[in-house]
């Protein structure tokens, strides 16, 4: 369904001012952040926020993140700021850390899916900050993709998913981090990471030794979502889903190669169009399979892997493959976020081999 004409334009100063005007008028604007592109609307305007849910096809039970450009705006978004929150903000903002705090009454309930809390962050991207500053209001912005689809890391990804459903897309190139922000719930004791992301767990542990990572999928049986999932609305297991069926292989390199070879043969016999989602290090060992391949970078360079991950999934969908055989990466640093997104893209089809 087409609601409106969508323009995709370079994020010049004039374009940013026009986008800010649209936000103030209740419109929808997609903009780059350092993590992924966001679909923004005035967070204080219930009708504008409602348009975000409609445009994405997102259920209103899935709360949004509020974006601010200035520490002073925080008092209008949250109703209490703890000393720990202050410390985290001083260290990590602007940056890929979203904090869950008690919601201020000026933020309509729909932003938070009716929860008494609100998610807030200050993005570390010049276009996002300029837009937020010029609009002068806090901006609610989920990732700018269709609900449950892969998050967008380029303006074109946004256009491909949402053309006709928003007014303007500011093109600021590819996003640098490539996976979404880390979400840290400060309303629980101890604080809990609800989603691993651009800021590593190790970095948070330095400041919060007792911080815990909430697993939203039971680890022993990954196909069964953790019942605790209800405390973190919106974190569905089936998320970031490519059209193809993705299988994720975890183990030693040798065992991963062995299993990928076997699976490729089986799937091709079954008539599937198979592709590989692997690392540069795997290219030579698997070259003889003659399959279409997306390589995400070197195993030792997880920043590059994260940066390319979502575009890689979209590229494979564009090649119209039906099965993706993917390798897993280590969980160090941003690796925890990479693994989380791959497990979701696999909808739980994690195959442990040794
Ligand atoms: O990097 C990012 O965080 C990107 C950019 C655009 O800032 N945004 C993003 O938003 O990833 P979204 O909507 O795709 O993911 C936000 C998630 C929700 O799915 C939900 O799980 C969690 O944040 N969330 C939001 N408000 C919450 C709350 N009050 N309590 C618990 N979780 C919340
Ligand atoms: Mg999202």
Image (tube, rainbow, N blue to C red):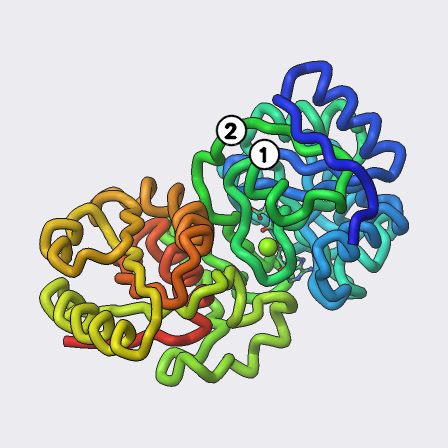
SS of the residue under disc 2 = loop
Residue 224 coordinates in the image, percent (x, y): 47, 84
Q: Quarter of the image holding residue 201?
A: bottom left
Q: Are marks 2 and 1 in contact (CB under 8 Å)?
A: yes
Residue 44 coordinates in the image, percent (x, y): 85, 44
**22 relative position to 94: left or right:** right
Q: Tell me if I can see residue 75 in this picture.
A: no
In the displayed structure, would residue 263 be above or below residue 302?
below
Question: 171 or 83, which lies in front?
Answer: 171
Question: 74 or 12, which lies in front?
Answer: 12
* Badge nearest the viewer, 2 or 1: 2
Q: Quarter of the image holding residue 170?
A: top right
Within-10-Å neighbours for mark 2: few <14, some 14–19, many 20+: some
Label located before the other in sequence (2 or 1) = 1
Residue 87 coordinates in the image, percent (x, y): 54, 41
The disc at residue 173 is: 2
- Ligand 2 quadrant in view: bottom right
Mark 1, residue position: 32
**318 relative position to 37: left or right:** left
Q: Quadrant of the N terminus?
A: bottom right
**224 relative position to 249: left or right:** right
The disc at residue 266 is: none
Q: Which residue is painted at 33% across and 42% down in the image?
A: 303
Q: Which residue is painted at 56% across and 27% down in the image?
A: 172
């Amino acid at each position: 369904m087409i609601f409106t004409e969508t323009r995709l334009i370079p994020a010049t100063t004039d374009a940013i001012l026009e986008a800010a005007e649209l936000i103030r008028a209740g419109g929808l604007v997609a903009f780059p952040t350092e993590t992924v592109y966001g679909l923004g609307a005035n967070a204080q305007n219930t009708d504008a926020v409602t348009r975000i849910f409609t445009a994405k096809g997102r259920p209103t039970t899935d709360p949004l993140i509020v974006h601010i450009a200035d520490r002073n705006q925080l008092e209008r978004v949250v109703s209490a700021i703890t000393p720990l929150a202050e410390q985290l903000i001083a260290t990590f903002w602007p940056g890929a850390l979203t904090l869950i705090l008690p919601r201020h009454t000026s933020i309509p309930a729909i932003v938070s899916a009716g929860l008494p809390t609100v998610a807030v962050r200050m993005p570390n991207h010049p276009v996002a900050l300029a837009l937020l500053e010029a609009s002068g209001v806090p901006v609610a912005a989920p990732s700018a993709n269709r609900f449950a689809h892969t998050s967008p890391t380029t303006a074109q990804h946004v256009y491909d998913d949402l053309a006709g459903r928003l007014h303007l897309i500011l093109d600021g190139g590819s996003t640098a981090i490539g996976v979404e922000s880390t979400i840290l719930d400060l309303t629980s004791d101890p604080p809990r990471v609800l989603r691993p992301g651009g800021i590593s767990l190790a970095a948070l542990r330095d400041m919060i030794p007792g911080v815990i990572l909430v697993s939203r999928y039971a680890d022993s049986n990954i196909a069964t979502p953790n019942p605790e999932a209800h405390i973190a609305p919106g974190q569905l297991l089936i998320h970031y889903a490519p059209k193809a069926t993705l299988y994720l292989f975890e183990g030693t390199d040798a065992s991963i190669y062995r299993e990928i070879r076997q699976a490729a043969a089986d799937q091709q016999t079954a008539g599937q169009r198979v592709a590989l989602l692997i690392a540069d290090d795997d290219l030579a060992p698997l070259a003889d399979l003659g399959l279409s391949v997306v390589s995400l970078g070197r195993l030792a360079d997880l920043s590059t892997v994260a940066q390319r991950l979502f575009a890689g999934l979209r590229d494979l969908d564009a090649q119209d493959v039906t099965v993706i055989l993917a390798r897993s990466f280590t969980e160090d640093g941003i690796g925890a976020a990479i693994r989380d997104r791959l497990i979701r893209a696999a909808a739980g089809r994690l195959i442990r081999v040794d």
